[in-house]
Amino acid sequence: MLKELRNIFFTGLLVLTPIVVTIYVFYQLFLKIDGLLGGKLIELTGQRIPGMGFVAVILLILLAGVFARNFIGKKMIQLAEYIVNRIPLINRVYSAVQQLSQAFFSGKRAVFQKAVLIEFPKKGSYCIGFQTSETKGEIQRQTRKELLSVFLPTSPNPTSGYLLFIPKDKVHPLQMTIEEAVKLVISGGAVLPQDRVEFRGEEARVLGEEDGKTIES
């Protein structure tokens, strides 16, 4: 009886935990966004309306999007970027944030091409990275190798990390999606994606083996 009650309790816990955590995260996010303009709106209106700051921030973002999509807005943004890009130090910060924003918020989603596995930081240790491009230009010319550009994120914050240029034969593509790989990094390995092995009965080569041996899947 006690064992059955314990199993029921943990089943309910497993069901409710992700729901409660999700609600809590979005509630905190709502409070943060609402607080950005909430104080100013209270000063202007003399009263506090819950959610008014949140709505104001969303409207401001939408207005910025509309402004950036018309001809005059594009020209003004280009002028502002031209000025910012000529201010020492500030131009580097702005450029880095702009590129990072395009990587995560752009509808094209072409910055991260695929999730890959690489041997890092030492032989026998592996990390998840994101292939961004095939390395060309001076870097390829200096190394005289076929390299791939791989962004190696840190855990649990995948917005920071390392840019590595790795020989193509040392980069192992993964079947998991980019979203699944990001979840894996953020969770510190706790959230594992679905295994997409199509042929479980066939032999699979072990990464890092150099003697040509294989093991059964």
Image (cartoon, rainbow, N blue to C red):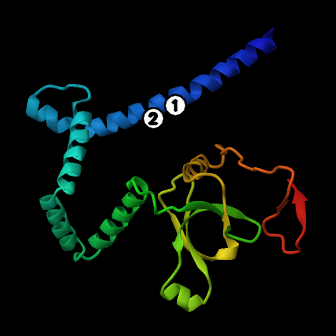
Please give left or right for residue 39 compared with residue 9 in the image.
Answer: left
Q: Please say if 203 is above or below 119.
A: above
Residue drawn at the location 26% of the way across and 40% of the way down: 58
Q: Please say if 69 is above or below 146.
A: above
Name the quadrant containing residue 10: top right
Indicate the secondary structure of the residue bearing disc 1.
helix
CA–CA distance in space, label 1 to label 2 = 6 Å
In the picture, the quarter occupied by the N terminus is top right
Q: Amino acid at mark 2?
A: Val
Please give left or right for residue 203 compared with residue 135 in the image.
Answer: right
Q: Nearer the viewer, residue 182 or 3?
A: 182
The total number of labels drawn is 2
Residue drawn at the location 33% of the way across and 72% of the way down: 92
Which numbered marker is on residue 58? Answer: none
Q: Please say if 154 is above or below 121.
A: above
Please give left or right for residue 190 compared with residue 105 in the image.
Answer: right
Q: Please say if 121 is above or below 2.
A: below
- Counting from the top left corner in percent of width and height, residue 139 is at 52, 85
Q: Amino acid at mark 1?
A: Val
Q: Residue furthest top?
A: 1
Q: Which residue is under mark 1?
A: 21
Residue drawn at the location 51% of the way across and 53% of the way down: 157
Instruction: Kindly indicate whether the residue at mark 2 contacts the one at mark 1 (C-beta within 8 angstroms).
Output: yes
Q: Which residue is under mark 2?
A: 25
Indicate the secondary structure of the residue bearing disc 2.
helix
- Counting from the top left corner in percent of width and height, residue 129 is at 59, 62
- Counting from the top left corner in percent of width and height, residue 147 is at 60, 79
Name the quadrant containing residue 123: bottom right
